[in-house]
Image (spheres, rainbow, N blue to C red):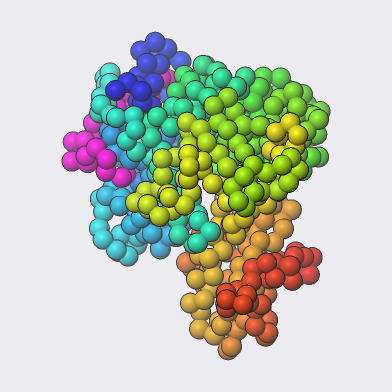
Amino acid sequence: MAATIGSALGWWARSKGERTAIVVGEEALTYRELQDWSSRIARSLADRGITRGERVGVLGPNSLAWPVIALGAMKAGTVLVPLNPRLKPAELRKVVDDAGITTVVFPVEFAAAVDETRALGDGFTGIEFGELAALRAGGVDDFRIDLDPDDPAALLFTSGSTGLSKGVICTNRTLLSIVFEASLVEEGLRPGTTTLLVLPLVFTPGLVWGLLMTIVLGGKIVIEPEFVPGKAARLLAEHEVQAIFGVPLIFEAISRSAEFEETDLSSLRTAIVGGAAVPVSLLERWAKKGVALRQIYGMTEAGGVATATLVQEAADHPDTCGTGSIFTEVTVVAEDGSPAEPGVEGEILLRGPGVTPGYWNDEESTAAALRDGWLHSGDLGKRDDQGRLQFVDRLKDLIITGGINISPVELERVIGEIDGVEEVAVIAASDARFGETPAAIVKVNGEVDEAGIIEHCDRLVADYKVPRYVIIRDEPLPRLPSGKLSKTAIRAEYRDVADRFEKLR
């Protein structure tokens, strides 16, 4: 059927083929070039025997080749699995196994990491970026597999509060629904838009709201290989950017750059921020430049953005996240499932066309999250008398650092492997730059010190997960009557970690 990402790309290649689609540094691709190159990649994958429905992992930082390969994988009918390049081989191995990845595409500098990942379990095929980059040259090519819009198109892995990563299923239908809904409510997301992406392509904001949103709308996406605040400010004006997304850290850094005050931001129509607490002072700083920077609430399971503050309410209600969207509903319920009264805290529930159909090969988690037509977020919120949502806290234990989820349970398991560690609890510590950062509270029995714990973590998990605070104590950690650690009591005892203890990294 025609309702796919690939069909949208094909349309723009035929109707606006000379329009610029992707800019990365000094390189650019038109829609015709993007269509042909991604089609040749799709054809190559099919010729290698990679069949429809197989999971293909794409590893690596932002580059010109990454989005083309990702689009090629989707046009080949495979299920795209973006792989975070900051993960260590043991972490990559878990995603490979959970998704059942049969092929990993990677830049040459990741060859050693891929080999180590392969050695930790069953084999998989590896393809270097260079092999597919060589397909850039060639004639017109419109190859793509005919797909069912409800088949899985991508798996986006998100850390769970249980420590188990979960593959959120995205179909062409849910992805196109996200684009369609956004195009109806966001002035900056119309056909022909220009988007600046300073976030990694591997995460939901970069892949869905950056790449796929822009390509389906026939716009231009300017992708930065790395985030440089001053350069990002210049690019906003240079490309007359209409839409930008990010976590507070991104907008804060841009606004503190020397270039910000002199930058013309009059082209910006959509500037949305989320993934961590947003200071009102940050919103005010952008407002002085004529930009209504607006808070969002969302999650990977709902396509990244479920609701955003209305432009006309940004100044008067900066601490809210809107009332939902044109097709996406947001509600808050009490413990018994009944609607919470205005001002009363409860769990945030969502439903809409962009909500995932479930988790990959995980019926239990799917059944727990999707009940009676609603996605249960596990987050705590409240609404005012006009239905505006205010995020309060997480019912889950997840730590969100710079917009990236970290599972405390995963870190607790890693630290618990160290000889001499008796008990460990990982909690969120406030951090001026990242919003939150992991803090490990550890009871030891032996010669275990802070440096050894950090060194152990650094070998096994991505750098952003390594605790910045390690507190070693002699007394047992507080427990519930059931015998489980009392995270509530531990968080209360160490609520001022950042003030009382030295940051170790």
Can I make out residue 22 in this image?
no
Say which of 129 and 378 sits in front: 378
The residue range painted magenta reads: 30-56
Say which of 472 and 301 sits in front: 301
Is residue 203 found left or right of 14 in the rendered image?
A: right
Q: Would you place residue 314 above or below residue 82 in this image?
A: above
Q: Residue at x 48, y 68 (%)?
A: 459
Say which of 322 and 38 sits in front: 322
Q: Quadrant of residue 146?
A: top left
Q: Is residue 35 magenta?
A: yes
Say which of 489 and 460 sits in front: 489
Q: Residue at x 43, y 50 (%)?
A: 367
Quadrant of the frame with the C terminus: bottom right
Q: Residue at x 27, y 49 (%)?
A: 102
Q: Would you place residue 230 above or below residue 236 in this image?
A: below
Give the x, y percent position of residue 82.
41, 44
